[in-house]
Image: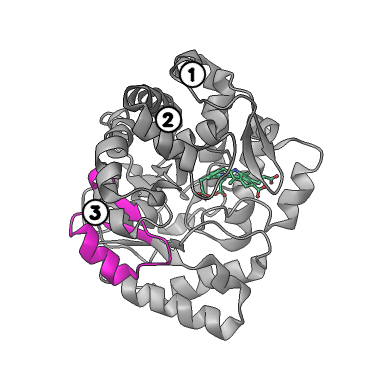
């Protein structure tokens, strides 16, 4: 089978010529030398790589058709469905990376925590974590239970050819918000109250979540994922001081759990303008930026040693084409201030997005940045 997104075979160089540390592309058919990985490392690229958070999902009619009749968390544990759903946006849009179809709560579900994803709501936890005893009762994630995940990643890597697969996990803080609130919330007040009132239990909870996130990422990296993204979606509700003291060490532990696996690390949260430098310090090669801070300013906040990912406002994709075109150009221009730029949205694709607009954005970013 021809790999999805494979480069023209006539342009390939022998596999032995790959030199990931070099500044000239050596093997355009290797995902480890893809523009995504190169931009993440701050190396020159053929053109700015682009993918979209939540690119697999309800903006695509072929996703809705395939998912019909299967519950979200069951779909995430079926390697054939995971493979097909992950490939759909790569085929349709020509994005420069696939992101594993899964969910941030999956490691908890596999470990045995009773969680359901309610359509239009998000993850709902049957018995929220509200006490020290609840923390200690959380089951650990046994790596042997992740065979389905390794199988899905291996089949994806085989199908994707030159296109890199991004593995991911939810960061300890964001997972803690679901466990403590019992479901999605705006203020995360119970979570913060627990963090302040029970500092020891909080540390134990985040320690445990870091261990399971690291296990989840290691399985994906070992099965062939070319990069990983740690989603700390809701970390932006914290002050920099609280983030630095009570959250960052646990996110750093997740990245450290990857050991010397040579995969670039992307770290992202929403509303993290005041935290961007700290998010980088947690161990990221690439800092994800939402739409609130322009990328040139984000580059200043993050400093020279890291690349940036982002940051088109997903709502812009619902506007007219002239607006989309103008905003894409602005993001590309401001992204030039970064060491490396991975074009993305500032958060996930909204379900009502016209998929043809996503395809047009990929084409425009490529056209604007072709070297
Ligand atoms: O394409 C991709 O980005 C890969 C798949 C992916 C999903 N969830 C699929 C999904 C990824 C990377 C996630 C991560 C995730 N899940 C995050 C971090 C990213 C972010 O948005 O900040 C968070 C916070 C969650 C928790 C979660 N899961 C929410 C808030 C929801 C939406 C609820 C809804 O129905 O609107 C989910 C469900 C979910 N995860 C869906 C998909 C495709 C929709 C479920 C469905 O199709 O029925």
Q: Is residue 161 left or right of residue 286?
A: right
Above or below for 234 versus 107? below
Above or below for 90 versus 355? above
CA–CA distance between discs 1 and 2?
9 Å
**Between 168 and 173, the one nearer to me in the picture:** 173
CA–CA distance between discs 3 and 2?
22 Å
Identity of the residue drawn at 57% across and 27% down: 128
Name the image quarter holding residue 211. Answer: top left
Would residue 58 be counted in the magenta stretch? no
Quadrant occupied by the C terminus: bottom left
Count neighbours of disc 3 (C-alpha within 10 A) and say few if under 14, some if 14 to 19, many if 20 or more. some
CA–CA distance between discs 1 and 3?
31 Å
The local secondary structure at tag 1 comes to loop
Q: Which mark is residue 141?
A: 1
Query: Percent from the top left, x then y, of residue 52?
Result: 51, 58
The local secondary structure at tag 3 comes to helix
User: Mark 1, mark 3: which one is toward the viewer?
Assistant: 3
- The color scheme shown is one colour
User: Mark 3, mark 2: which one is toward the viewer?
Assistant: 3
Q: Is residue 272 left or right of residue 324?
A: left
Residue at the far left in the pictured view: 304
Q: Which mark is residue 362?
A: none
Q: Is residue 323 visible?
A: yes
Which label's residue is closer to the chain start, 1 or 3? 1
Query: Percent from the top left, x then y, of residue 370?
Result: 38, 73
The local secondary structure at tag 2 comes to helix
Q: Which mark is residue 277?
A: 3
Name the image quarter holding residue 1. Answer: top right
Q: Which residues are magenta?
A: 280-309
Q: Which residue is mark 2?
A: 213
């Amino acid at each position: 089978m021809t790999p999805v997104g494979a480069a023209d075979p006539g342009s390939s160089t022998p596999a032995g010529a790959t030199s990931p540390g070099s500044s000239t592309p050596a093997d355009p058919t290797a995902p480890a030398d893809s523009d995504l990985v190169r931009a993440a490392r701050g190396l020159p690229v053929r053109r700015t790589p682009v993918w979209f958070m939540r690119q697999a999902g309800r903006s695509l009619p072929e996703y809705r058709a395939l998912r019909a009749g299967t519950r979200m968390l069951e779909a995430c544990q079926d390697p054939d469905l995971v493979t097909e759903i992950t490939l759909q946006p790569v085929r349709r849009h020509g994005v420069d990376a696939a992101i594993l179809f899964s969910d941030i709560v999956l490691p908890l579900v596999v470990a045995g925590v009773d969680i359901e994803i309610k359509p239009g709501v998000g993850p709902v936890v049957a018995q929220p974590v509200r006490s020290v005893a609840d923390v200690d009762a959380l089951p650990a994630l046994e790596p042997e239970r992740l065979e389905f995940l390794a199988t899905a990643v291996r089949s994806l890597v085989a199908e994707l050819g030159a296109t890199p697969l991004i593995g991911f996990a939810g960061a300890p803080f964001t997972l803690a918000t679901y466990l403590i609130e019992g479901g999605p919330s705006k203020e995360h007040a119970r979570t913060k109250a627990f963090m302040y009132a029970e500092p020891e239990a909080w540390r134990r909870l985040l320690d445990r979540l870091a261990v399971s996130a690291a296990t989840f990422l290691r399985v994906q990296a070992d099965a062939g994922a070319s990069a990983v993204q740690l989603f700390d979606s809701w970390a932006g509700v914290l002050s920099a001081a609280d983030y630095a003291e009570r959250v960052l060490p646990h996110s750093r532990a997740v990245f450290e759990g990857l050991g010397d696996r040579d995969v670039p690390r992307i770290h992202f949260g929403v509303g993290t303008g005041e935290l961007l430098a700290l998010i980088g310090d947690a161990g990221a090669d690439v800092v994800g930026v939402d739409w609130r801070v322009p990328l040139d300013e984000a580059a200043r906040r993050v400093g020279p040693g890291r690349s940036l990912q982002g940051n088109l406002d997903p709502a812009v994709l619902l506007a007219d084409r002239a607006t989309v075109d103008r905003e894409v150009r602005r993001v590309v221009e401001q992204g030039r201030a970064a060491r490396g730029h991975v074009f993305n949205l500032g958060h996930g694709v909204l379900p009502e997005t016209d998929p043809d607009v996503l395809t047009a954005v990929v084409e425009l970013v490529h056209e604007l940045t072709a070297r």
